[in-house]
Amino acid sequence: MTTTAPGYGQVDRDYAMRMATCPPEEDGPVWMVNLMHYRGEAVYADGKSGISGREADERYAPLDILSDLGAEVAFMGEVEQQILGDAPRWDRVAVVRYPTRRSFIEMQARPDFQERHVHKEAGMAQTIVAGCLPLGPPRDLSSAQATDSTDATEPAWAEVPHPPTDEDGPIVVFHLLRFHEDASETGIAAYQKAAKPVVVAQGRRVLGWFGVEGTIVGDGRAWDQAHFNAFPSLRAFNAVLDDPDRQAAQAAHRDVAVADTYTMVLRPTIDRLAASLAAPS
């Protein structure tokens, strides 16, 4: 990532090497899922600050560099609730689509990126950055389609029990999952099948489900999947949580399969995730 170890997490050097040496014919787009926990006040090496960790991260945001690489911010959301998962309490979740793994690694060596990185180091208390690939074929679910699905099996959001309102608008529920080795992915698949009638009835839209191929920065834990699901309102998601059939499926399948998780309610500020999955490689 940088020439020195960052203060906000452990770097997986083996995964970084795999990304850097991936043969061109095997390389391709990678979605870097970022969980961000900010310092209350930014801490710079010279002792000067006067700004929050979030403000320092805004100064870091290398949007022009990403554009130069052919990368894009596919999603960004503010954490409204953290439902599952111990400390830290995450502040923001973002997804950046890079055209190749190698482009992500090469970005770290750019002088203009390194100049910006001082702000990330100052503002970020802890982060997880997971390299992800889509699970299954991409679905072209743009933000516009999300409120008026053309899929006959998915009710339009105007027709669900808890439609979006001015006071309670659309949310995205994010899950970062690590499975028990003996349970693998079969348990979560069984849960998804059992819970599907409930979540679909409440208007859930799959924005993107990903498999994690490596965690480039984190706390030493390995993760398996990252899921982004849109709901028409927080009330709709709470109705899913309270549904007894879904609760039974969770106890029978999900709780058995999942060894560790973060589950968060996000209010999106950028949502091009589904479009990024549909984009040509």
Image (tube, helix red, strand yellow):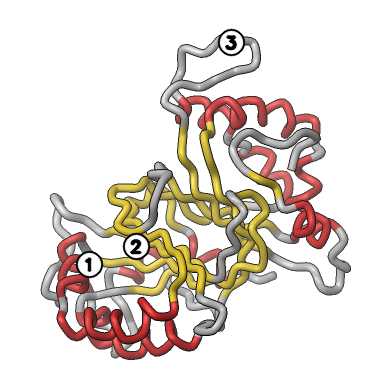
Q: Where does the C terminus fall, quadrant-wise?
A: bottom right
Secondary structure of residue under mark 1 = helix
Residue 85 visible in the current orientation: yes
Q: Residue at x 87, y 61 (%)?
A: 21
Residue 274 visible in the current orientation: no
Residue density around tag 3, few if under 14, some if 14–19, many if 20 or more, within 10 Å: few
Instruction: Say what amino acid the circle numbered 2 marks.
Output: Val
Residue projecting furthest to the front? 182
Residue 31 in the image: above or below residue 79: below
Horizontal side, residue 203 vs residue 22: left or right: left
Instruction: Say what amino acid the circle numbered 1 marks.
Output: Phe
Instruction: Say what amino acid the circle numbered 3 marks.
Output: Gly
Mark sitting earlier along the chain (3/2): 3
Residue that carries the numbered disc 2 in the rendered image: 173
**C-alpha separation, residue under disc 2 versus residue under disc 1:** 8 Å
Secondary structure of residue under mark 3 = loop
Horizontal side, residue 51 vs residue 145: left or right: right
Residue that carries the numbered disc 1 in the rendered image: 237
Q: Residue at x 46, y 70 (%)?
A: 259
Horizontal side, residue 80 vs residue 234: left or right: right
Residue 143 in the image: above or below residue 12: below
| Position of residue 127 measured from the top left corner of the image (x, y, whole percent) | 54, 44
Residue 255 in the image: above or below residue 116: below
Q: Which of pointers 1 and 3 indicates the residue nearer the eye?
A: 3
Given residues 199 and 223, the one toward you in this image is 223
| Position of residue 260 measured from the top left corner of the image (x, y, whole percent) | 45, 65
Q: Which of pointers 3 and 2 indicates the residue nearer the eye?
A: 3
Residue that carries the numbered disc 3 in the rendered image: 47
The reply to whether callout 2 and callout 1 are in contact (CB within 8 Å) is: yes
